Image (tube, rainbow, N blue to C red):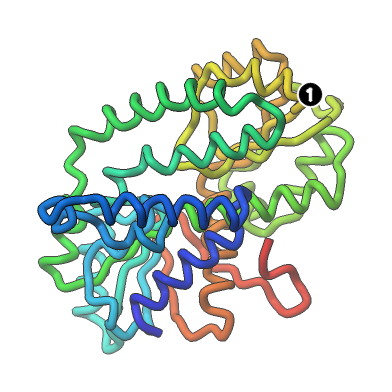
Amino acid sequence: MKLGEIYRRAVAVGIDHDLRGREEIDRLIKAEKERYEKLDDNEKAAYDLDRLFNPFADTRILYGDPETEVKKVLIGIDLEVGEVLLAYLLNRDRSEKIDCLIAHHPEGRALAHLAEVMKLQVDLLSQYGIAVSVVEQLMEKRMAEVERRLLPINHNRTVDVARLLGLPFLCLHTPADNCVTAYLKKKFDQEKPLLLKDLLKILLSIPEYQAASKLEGAPKILHGSENSRCGQIYVDMTGGTEGSKEIFDKIATSGISTIVGMHFSEDHLEKAKKANLNIVMAGHIASDTLGLNLLLDAIDPENELEFICVSGFERRRRSLGEEKEP
């Protein structure tokens, strides 16, 4: 399988499992194409052409020829300079070559544009009856905050090392997050947990969360009790990073009772508590691992790729007869 094919398949799977729906994704891509046509020649020369088919700014080939043949991959949740050097050492010491690096969390230009992906949260929350104008205004403030935080970061540090060592580098962020969000939403909709302890049992029936529990990273109720009723559940696991901490009152009045997320900052958690919402932290690395596994199942159904797993990731394929996709 070629590097570009892995990338294109990941984008397609991310779109298929985007809860905004295909019609909205098509609208966004059409608007981007119209914007591109209005640019002058200098602006077009600097334009990222991937935007014309890929709506996820945090998912890119960071370095490498799309025509590169890929068989063996070093893959992890975070790939930074240490992991890139590890791949180089493994290449030097083994007869079989690592063909590329795949990270979940973005680096390089994909990290620089992370805030753009947060627009996804506007559409998801508006589906629950929160006025889109309210969500947009709150999210615009938060997106600007995230953008300012990312501006001074040395985005390309890890990518530069991969380039100098000749290691193709790909990051797959929102497509994997879309997969885990859609998967858990469908699971909760089907199994209809009554109490938070029932919700935890569902999470702990999933291998990635079982594995995390053995490493003292079990899903945890942060607000509410085991016997609190779940009510309507909102799965908050996609859209780049945490949204506005001012949104929780609006979420509560929309009819949502329980939020299941990867992680919650102290400020976000305190606001959620004041809104009397049940909060369940499923776990960051476990949720990212589940999403990435679901994405890889769809990208590589014939098991053509071989994975060397590092940085918190463990490859788990869904066997025949199990759910392969959300």
Q: Is residue 214 visible?
A: no
Which image quarter is the N terminus in?
bottom left
Which three-letter amino acid code belongs to the residue tagged 1? Ser
On the rendered structure, is 136 left or right of 57?
A: right
- 47 lies above or below 306: above
Q: Can residue 75 be seen in this view?
A: yes
- 183 lies above or below 94: above
- Give the residue displayed 41% in from the left and 50% down from the top: 31
On the rendered structure, is 256 left or right of 282?
A: right
Q: Where residue 278 sits: x, y (%)?
A: 72, 25
Of the pair 76 and 23, the residue shown nearer to us: 23
- Give the residue displayed 71% in from the left and 29% down from the top: 129
On the rendered structure, is 235 left or right of 153?
A: right
Task: Give the residue number, with chain letter if any, for mark 1.
Answer: 225
Q: Where residue 264 sits: x, y (%)?
A: 54, 29
Of the pair 237 and 307, the residue shown nearer to us: 237
Look at the numbered disc 1 and give the secondary structure of its residue. Answer: loop
